[in-house]
Image (cartoon, helix red, strand yellow):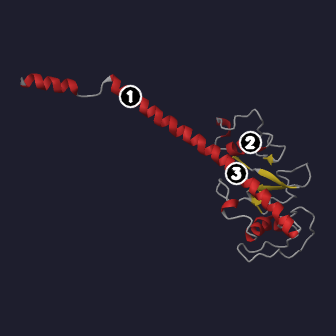
């Protein structure tokens, strides 16, 4: 009897094929949900950028209605962030464009000081704040006249710090899907309406990106 019990116990050890199949199915479902969850997060980031862009555009228009000029236009130096709001002293020509680094750097600060934007509104998902490019920069608007873009700029010049996949998807969501035309632009590398924004070609690539604000 003891021998038979030992034999039964030996037969019961380990997993059956059915049990292994169930485990593999569960693992596959978990991995599938993880990848799908990442896709949903990436898509949410693109929509968040589009929402930020719309909010900044609205803030520019409200500022203009209140004060008769766009934020930063004519500023000789950026005001202090968080200071009691007052339009900066006019040191240049108010021409409806932010022509230089001082004007471009003043824009987002003035919008925050006027309580039209919060610190969260100007924080991009790429690890830096949104700023405004000067209309004289030649990175995004070369050959097409003066334009100001919402970008991750340093002293009015856009920097290549945005994930190319998000830039491509954003362009397709709110513009024409072509990197050198329309209101969303990048000149780091070409993409068009037929590009797979989430494909391997754009993985690990950083873009300068601009979303047109003025004019």
Residue 116 in picture, x, y percent from top left:
75, 65
Is any atom of residue 107 visible in this view? yes
Query: The N terminus lies in which quarter of the figure?
Result: top left
Q: What residue is drawn where x is 83% and y is 43%? A: 180
Marked residue nearer the N-terminal end (1 or 3)? 1
Which residue: 77% across, 35% down?
193
* Residue pictured at 86% horizontal, 51% vertical: 141
- Spatial CA distance of label 1 from label 3 is 41 Å
**Crowding at label 1, few (<14), some or many (≥20) Cα neighbours within 10 Å?**
few
Q: Which residue is drawn at 79% across and 68% down?
A: 106
Question: Can you see residue 70?
Answer: no
Local crowd at mark 2 within 10 Å, few (<14), some, or many (≥20)? Answer: few
**Residue 88 appears left or right of 200:** right
Q: Is residue 3 left or right of residue 40?
A: left
How packed mark 3 is, by other alpha carbons closer than 10 Å (few <14, some 14-19, many 20 or more), is some
* Mark closest to the chain's N terminus, 3 or 2: 3
Q: Which of 110 and 130 is in front in this view?
A: 110
Query: Residue 172: x, y in percent?
Result: 75, 40
Is 109 above or below relative to 27? below
Cα distance between the residues tagged 3 and 2: 11 Å
* Mark 1 element type: helix
Q: Mark 3 points at which residue?
A: 49
Q: Is residue 211 left or right of residue 199?
A: right
Query: Which residue matches tag 1?
Result: 22
Marked residue nearer the N-terminal end (1 or 2): 1
Residue 13, above or below 122: above
Say how many tags the image has: 3
* Residue that label 2 marks: 173
Any mark on residue 70, and which? none
Specify the quadrant of the image occupied by residue 127.
bottom right
In terms of depth relative to the viewer, which is nearer, 89 or 67? 67
């Amino acid at each position: 009897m003891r021998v038979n019990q030992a034999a039964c116990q030996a037969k019961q050890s380990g997993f059956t094929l059915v049990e292994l199949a169930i485990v593999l199915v569960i693992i596959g479902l978990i991995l599938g949900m993880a990848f799908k969850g990442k896709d949903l997060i990436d898509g949410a980031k693109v929509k968040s950028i589009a929402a930020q862009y719309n909010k900044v555009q609205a803030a520019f228009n409200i500022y203009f209605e209140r004060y008769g000029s766009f934020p930063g236009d004519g500023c000789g130096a950026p005001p202090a962030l968080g200071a009691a709001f007052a339009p900066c002293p006019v040191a240049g020509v108010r021409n409806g464009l932010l022509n230089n680094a001082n004007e471009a750097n003043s824009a987002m600060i003035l919008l925050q000081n006027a309580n039209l934007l919060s610190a969260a509104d100007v924080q991009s998902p790429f690890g830096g704040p949104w700023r405004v490019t000067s209309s004289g920069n030649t990175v995004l608007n070369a050959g097409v006249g003066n334009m100001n873009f919402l970008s991750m700029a340093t002293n009015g010049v856009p920097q290549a710090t945005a994930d190319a996949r998000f830039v491509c998807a954003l362009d397709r969501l709110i513009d024409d899907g072509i990197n050198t035309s329309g209101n969303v632009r990048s000149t780091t590398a070409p993409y068009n309406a037929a590009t797979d924004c989430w494909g391997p070609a754009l993985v690990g690539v950083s873009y300068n990106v601009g979303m047109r604000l003025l004019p």
